[in-house]
Amino acid sequence: MPSDEYPPVTASTIRSLYGAAYRCAHPDCRRPLYNVDGESGDRVLNSRVAHIHARRRGGARWIDMPAEENRNFDNLLLLCTQHSYEIDDFPDRFPAEMLREWKAAQIREYDQVHSWPLTDSEAEEVLTVSEDEPVWSTLELVRQVEAVRLTAQRTRTATRAAVTSWQELRKRTQAGFLGWDDDGNDVVVEPAPVEVEPIKRRIVATLAAADEELTPKVEAARVELAAARAAHPQLQAWVDDLGRHLVGLQQVAAVWQGGSDPDDDDAFNQALAGVGTSIGGLLNRARGEAVTAPEPPPEEPRAAEADAYAEHLQLLQEGRPHHRVDNRPYDPDLRYRLAAATAYAMTLPRTISSIAVDVDATAELAVAVSRNADLSEQLRLLDEDARREPLAAAVALLFATARRSDTPTEVIEAARRRALELLGSTDWEDSRNWTDELLGGPRTFNELAALTSGDTVAAPISDALAARPELVRLILVACAQWSEQVDRQTWQTTGFTRRYREEPTWLPVSAIRAAATQVDPDTAFADLPLQHLLDWACC
């Protein structure tokens, strides 16, 4: 019965091979079989003995043959380290007939140049290197990494399509309005929030889907990298570099940082290119190329803000399975941590790149985790949520509960009731409650007004202004919406500013004008538009 493994090549055969060749047998390769140090004259082995028909069953171009023929001069080929691995990684591209032609050309060339006569110790070195067949192959890693790259590109197409619809909406809105301010500058009009929000939700959905698809593929590639690290410790720097690039691509693919321009996606494009460059370096090094090791990541500790953001992302990742399916059991610890994280989420800017991680997204995940808690526990959680600080975090949790279609009626009614209690119990005369970090901008009052009426929300604001007119500037700023500043030629986001696109139904404008007059009697506020009042407040 044929053997599954033929005997190794003998030292005398190796000496014969190197005595009849000078360079790698690959027709397009000029690498010599040995590199010679220009200063010392020392020879450094740069090649391996490759089998035309593999020595081990399952190897490249394996056939049953007599053992002596397998290790005979005619079945052996001298190649540089890189090409010796390549012909075995891709055997279909390098059939035996082709390799025999290479060998014949290599021997013919010997007559025109010179060979590498070996000592006994050098022959032993060649034997050791050539028989050190790795247990890990680059081929599977290439497949896994390419799967990550292709998945990232495909899922990004869906995100860019959603962003394109946002860009087109902005163009239509701005094309339908031609206006300028008192100084003659163009006024940039943004679409109404009711038109933008569905597009933002679509963008968030595509980003979540991309992350869900990429996670198992990145994990599979990292498993192959672990095998590479174990099989070839000398590759650790390149393996670690590729691992960092894969994780970086996954993280970038889960966010959108390009505003409303679908082509402004530099971070993603750079991450994708970085993976390609990194695996190229690893493959070249694995095949014997003299390539510079990648730079290690900075050893400096990350800023506390970066640590907090990374922890927040990880926490949201824990909660997302509860949002995707409705059969996961209630996890009290995870629910508590997500609810507490709304305080941190309040500090994140409400831009398109953060809507998947902001206070509303965090609150919705917290509520999703507790969807399968019993009724008494859900009611207890409402009491806990209502005590959260800042105020905007408590409101976000209460309204996230009230919005869920699978929330029991008793819980929805209790959530609304607790939100109204917050409106009545908050000391609106305290200036600290008008900071963005606590109030969360106009979204808090929009939610409360939708639940009750504009007059119900306006009353405590009017009372606060009557008692403390000096609050008027804080109130005007806190109740204005954030608006992107965009270069109308390039559609690039250049910054953010506060604006009043329309007069909120819950904002007591007459009380604001009266308070402003008390603070600044020399200015006529009676006929000033709300946006001009905001400009005054920001002076």
Image (spheres, grey):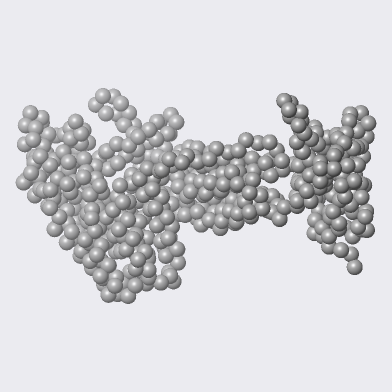
Q: Position of residue 456 (x, y in %)?
A: 15, 55
Q: Say whether residue 168 is visible.
A: no
Q: In which quadrant of the rendered image does the C terminus lie?
A: top left
Location of the N terminus (image quadrant): bottom right
Residue 172 in the image: state x and y as whole percent: 41, 39
Q: Residue at x 22, y 62 (%)?
A: 386
* One can see residue 307 in this view: yes
Q: Is residue 124 left or right of residue 19?
A: left
Residue 501 pos. (x, y %): 27, 40
Among the 4 quarters of the image, the one containing residue 220:
bottom right
Using the image as rendered, state which of residue 16 and residue 200 is in the foreground. 16
Residue occupying the point 69% across, 50% down: 138
Q: Is residue 422 left or right of residue 126?
A: left
Which residue is nearer to you in this view: 297 or 438?
Answer: 297
The one of 346 and 111 positioned closer to us in this rendering: 111
Q: How many marks?
A: 0
Identified at 35% across, 34% down, the residue is 495
User: Residue 264, position in %: x, y?
Assistant: 48, 37
Which residue appears at 12% of the width and 48% of the height? 430
Please identify the quarter of the rendering in which residue 99 is found.
top right
Residue 202 appears left or right of 408: right
